[in-house]
Structure formats: structure tokens, C-alpha cells
């Protein structure tokens, strides 16, 4: 859990906290670690087309590069927060950082897709320990209200800006060095962070009942894992026995998790947090936003690089408008939410964001970035910015101090789990739309004289010939190659368009949920929003 573990009574006054005197150095270390975790969420998306080609990963399997990280991260965040508080925050921070670096090295030197998937899952496991430990150190170090607000502002800026930095850095490393450095870059960052943490940060831990809810941790991990895998199997049909079995098994494990949490003295997740109607709406919104963000950015990257032919660097730059407009709208939303309350913004934001995604769903093979992609990203960013600030505030509404950490962790977990579930679902949507296109459209018939190398027998493995090579061919052959290119890209774009359309539908669902559930007024909002949302 990304533990905004409210400063417990054990922390005592500021003078009793061993890190208080060096609190600004501690902030720099924590912010540095947070940057690494946030970077990893977007830097790999830009590198994915290159990694897919290098490791011969299929179109259906490539989503596991994202899904394995998000699933492990989200499923273990709650347990990671407990471990950090009980085992020791400094110790957990160092172990999480070291493990993240090792997993990054394994991924950076991966020779097969399976090795990369496992490495990404390992990153998620250690990020689930690192992220809550970092934020818990920050929260227990800054106990003064004004200083903590400044510290949280820095931490939040890193969380928001790191995603944009990841898009650019991923493009630069992929284009000018190698995609593997999008993972290997974490190693020097982690080594530096560990080196400065050991002498500067002092150990702190929670007191009182420090028993672990291991049955709850196992059940939620099994439930989410089975559910996500069931969604990935749906590419073969929602009515297939294995699809139904895994989804049903996942739901059964999650039901058992709820039953166990009701009877556990020290639960992993106090059920009073999600059962509150306002907080429940925020958590549902968080899960749907997580799925939309990953779905939009992942398939947008494929469209920019594969269809429009953008370089990795330009793909990163082309993705930035969404982040830019999220920042602008978030600033406006922070001011408006104190004047008009969270509900109007949470009703309007999803509709605006869905409109942007619907615009993206209209892309075609020869669409222009400036007429289709840019306005769609801008509108999507504005909608998400309006939604996310009040949503994060609402997640803490009415939460007692001792449960504030669990509440914030749950927002982070739902974002990550939503991303994992959404990516699995969108992979199935993409595959189904692509298959429908190829079933409804006959492949071009090659004229005489076309080299066999330009007539792929498997559309999934088709490649686009070099333009210079095409120009040397006779006109009938050039026409065939052009039509083949349109056919190949048309199948891809049909898949991307379907993903954007379904993402729009998922975001639009938030509006009726908010209308029905949210009752909070502007005076009900907490003074400080949760931080560390990534």
C-alpha cells in the first residue's frame, strides 16, 4: 500500500523522529526513488515495439510486458505497505530498491519474451515494497502541516511529471542507444539511491499490533491473477471453458478475500474503506481510469510508431499532449473542487475524456496526427485532469487517521489493477477487431512479377517494404504494394480503434456511478489530497 500512513502516535512529535533533522535530504531521496518507479510505467511503453521485434513477441503476448508489472504491483501494494510499516521502512526501501534493480537487469538482458515478462513482474513485486516504504518514510518524517504539504507537493509533482519524462527518455534511449536501456537505466539510479539512503535515512517502524494478514494477501493475489488471465484467454472466445473457469475462479478468490477480511482482527484492507458510498465511487473511478490510461497510451504508441511511422523519440513527444493537458486541468480542478464540490467535476470529467477517446477511435491508416491524434489527446487529458483531483480527494473522505494509509494504498492498487485488467481486456478487443477486419476484407492479389518476399502468407508477420525499394518496381507492382500496405495497416488500425472506443465506454461508466453514489459536498473534502498516485 502506498502508505500515507498518517503519522501514528508512535511517531511522536517532530523532535522524536530520527529523520526530522535531515528531512529535506530525505525528501530528495524519496522523490528520486519515486521518479524511478513512475518512469518505469511509461518508458517501457515507448520501447515496446522495438522489444517486440527483437524478442519475437506476438501481438497478443506483448501486452504482458505491461500487464505483468501492473498486476504484481497492484496485487501486492497493500501487503507491501504493511511490510514497510512493520518490518522497517528504511529496510524495506533498500530491499525494494535493490530488488527493482535486479529485476531491471534481468529484463534488460532478456533473450525471450517470457524472460522479459518475468522480469517485469519482478519489478512490480519490488515496486510494491519500494513505493509504500518511500511514502511512509516521507509521511513520518514531515509531521508539521505546512512542511508536509510542501513535501507532498514535491512528491506529487514527481509522480505527475515522471510519466512525461518517461515518454521522452524512453524514446531517446530506444532510438539512440537500445530499448534494453529503458530497463537498465534503473540500475545506476537504484545504486545511487541505496548509497545515499544507508548513511542518511534512519530506521523507523510502526508499533502495536504488527501481525500480517497473509491469507488475505494470498487470496487477493490469486483472485486478481486468475481474473486477469481469464480476460487474456477471452481472445479465444468468452464462452470457452478455460475463459469462464479462470474468471469464475478469480471472482471466487476475491469473494473469499472479503469473507476473510471481515473476520480478521488486523485485516490487510479494512472493509469500511471501500464500503463507504463516496469512497466506493472514487475507487470504481480509479480502476476505470487505470484501465483507460494504460489502454490509451499502449495502443497509441503502436499507432504512432507502426502506422504513422514515428520514431521512438517523436512517439514520446507525440504522446505528451495528454500529460500536458492533465496538468492544466488538474490545476483548475484543484481550485474548482473547493468552490463547487467534487461531484460536478467527477460527472463532467469522464464525459470529456470519453469524447477525446471517441475522437481517437476515428483514426484511419492515413489520418493526420494534428487533425485526429492531437485533439483527441488534448480532450482526453482535460477530462482526466478534471476527474482525477476530486477522485483522489474523495478516496480519503471520512477516513479515520489510522486508516488513511490503507485508503490511499487502495486508490493506487485500483489504478494498477485496473490497468492490468484493462490491458488484458483490450488485448482481446484488439485481436477480435483485427480478426473481423481480415474476415471481411480480402487480401490483395499480387500481379505477376512481385517478389515472394513482398507477399506475406501471414498477415500478423507482414512487413512494409522500404520506400526506396518500392520506387524501383513497375507501377502495377507499386500499386499492389500500396494496397497490401493499406490492408495490413487497416487490420492494425481496426484493432486500435476498437480499443479506443471500448476505453471511452469504460470511462463514461464513471459518470452514472458518480451520479448515483456520490453525496459529498465541498465542505466534506479532506484538506490534503492523497499523493503518490501512479
Image: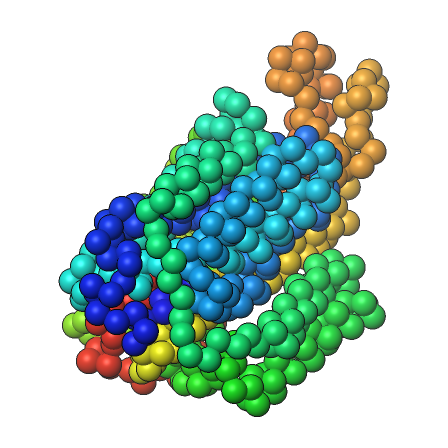
Q: Is residue 268 above or below residue 24?
A: below
Q: Is residue 8 above or below residue 449?
A: below
Where does residue 461 sit, x and y in percent of width and height?
75, 34
Q: Please indicate, yes or no, whether residue 276 appears anywhere in the rendered image.
A: yes
Q: Is residue 102 left or right of residue 143?
A: right
Can you see residue 534? no
Residue furthest top as drawn? 472
Instruction: Choose between 4 and 431: the one closer to the eye.
Output: 4
- Of all residues, the one furthest to the bottom in this rendering is 263
Which corner quadrant holds the C terminus? bottom left
Q: Position of residue 193 (x, y in %)?
A: 41, 42
Residue at 46% across / 40% down in the picture?
190
Tell me which residue sits at (72%, 34%) in the image: 111
62 sits to left or right of 41: right
Q: Nearer the viewer, residue 259 or 437?
A: 259
The residue under the point 63% across, 60% down is: 425
Specify the quadrant of the image occupied by residue 226.
bottom right
Query: Residue 238 lies in what quarter of the image?
Result: bottom right
Left or right: 36, with 464 as reference point:
left
Task: Tell me where residue 252 appears, x and y as whole percent.
Answer: 69, 80
Amino acid at each position: 500500500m502506498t502508505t500515507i500512513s498518517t503519522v501514528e502516535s508512535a511517531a511522536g512529535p517532530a523532535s522524536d523522529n530520527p529523520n526530522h533533522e535531515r528531512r529535506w535530504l530525505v525528501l530528495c531521496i524519496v522523490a528520486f526513488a519515486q521518479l524511478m518507479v513512475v518512469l518505469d510505467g511509461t518508458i517501457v511503453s515507448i520501447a515496446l515495439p522495438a522489444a517486440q521485434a527483437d524478442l519475437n513477441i506476438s501481438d497478443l503476448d506483448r501486452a504482458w510486458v505491461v500487464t505483468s508489472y501492473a498486476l504484481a504491483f497492484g496485487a501486492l501494494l497493500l501487503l507491501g505497505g504493511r511490510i514497510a510499516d512493520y518490518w522497517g521502512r528504511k529496510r524495506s526501501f533498500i530491499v525494494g530498491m535493490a530488488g527493482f534493480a535486479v529485476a531491471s537487469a534481468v529484463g534488460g538482458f532478456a533473450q525471450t519474451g517470457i524472460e522479459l515478462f518475468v522480469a517485469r513482474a519482478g519489478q512490480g513485486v519490488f515496486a510494491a515494497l519500494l513505493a509504500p516504504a518511500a511514502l511512509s518514510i516521507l509521511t513520518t518524517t514531515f509531521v508539521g502541516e505546512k512542511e508536509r504539504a510542501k513535501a507532498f507537493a514535491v512528491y506529487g509533482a514527481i509522480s505527475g511529471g515522471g510519466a512525461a519524462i518517461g515518454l521522452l527518455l524512453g524514446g531517446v534511449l530506444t532510438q539512440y542507444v537500445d530499448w534494453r536501456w529503458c530497463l537498465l537505466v534503473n540500475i545506476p539510479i537504484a545504486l545511487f539511491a541505496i548509497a545515499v539512503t544507508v548513511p542518511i535515512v534512519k530506521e523507523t517502524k510502526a508499533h502495536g499490533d504488527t501481525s500480517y494478514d497473509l491469507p488475505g494477501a494470498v487470496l487477493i493475489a490469486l483472485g486478481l491473477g486468475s481474473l486477469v488471465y481469464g480476460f487474456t484467454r477471452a481472445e479465444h472466445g468468452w464462452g470457452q471453458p478455460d475463459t469462464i473457469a479462470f474468471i469464475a475462479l478469480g471472482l471466487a478468490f476475491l469473494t473469499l478475500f472479503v469473507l476473510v477480511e471481515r473476520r480478521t482482527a488486523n485485516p490487510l484492507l479494512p472493509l469500511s474503506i471501500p464500503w463507504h458510498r463516496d469512497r466506493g465511487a472514487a475507487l470504481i473511478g480509479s480502476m476505470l481510469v487505470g484501465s483507460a490510461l494504460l489502454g490509451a497510451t499502449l495502443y497509441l504508441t503502436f499507432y504512432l510508431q507502426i502506422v504513422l511511422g514515428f520514431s521512438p523519440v517523436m512517439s514520446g513527444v507525440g504522446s505528451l499532449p495528454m500529460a500536458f493537458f492533465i496538468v492544466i486541468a488538474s490545476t483548475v480542478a484543484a481550485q474548482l473542487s473547493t468552490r463547487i464540490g467534487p461531484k460536478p467535476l467527477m460527472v463532467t470529467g469522464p464525459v470529456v475524456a470519453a469524447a477525446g477517446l471517441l475522437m481517437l477511435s476515428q483514426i484511419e491508416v492515413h489520418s493526420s496526427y494534428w487533425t485526429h491524434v492531437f485533439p483527441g489527446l488534448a480532450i482526453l487529458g482535460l477530462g482526466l485532469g478534471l476527474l482525477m483531483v476530486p477522485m483522489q480527494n474523495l478516496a480519503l473522505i471520512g477516513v479515520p487517521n489510522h486508516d488513511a494509509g490503507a485508503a490511499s494504498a487502495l486508490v493506487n492498487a485500483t489504478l494498477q489493477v485496473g490497468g492490468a485488467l484493462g490491458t488484458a481486456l483490450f488485448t482481446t478487443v484488439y485481436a477480435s477487431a483485427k480478426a473481423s477486419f481480415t474476415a471481411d476484407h480480402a487480401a490483395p492479389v499480387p500481379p505477376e512479377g512481385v517478389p515472394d518476399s513482398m507477399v506475406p502468407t501471414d498477415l500478423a508477420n507482414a512487413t512494409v517494404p522500404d520506400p526506396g525499394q518500392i520506387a524501383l518496381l513497375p507501377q502495377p507492382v507499386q500499386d499492389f504494394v500500396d494496397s497490401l500496405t493499406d490492408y495490413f495497416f487497416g487490420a492494425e488500425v481496426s484493432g486500435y480503434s476498437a480499443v479506443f472506443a471500448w476505453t471511452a465506454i469504460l470511462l463514461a461508466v464513471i459518470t452514472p456511478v458518480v451520479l448515483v453514489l456520490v453525496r459529498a459536498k465541498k465542505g466534506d473534502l479532506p484538506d490534503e489530497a492523497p499523493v503518490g498516485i501512479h
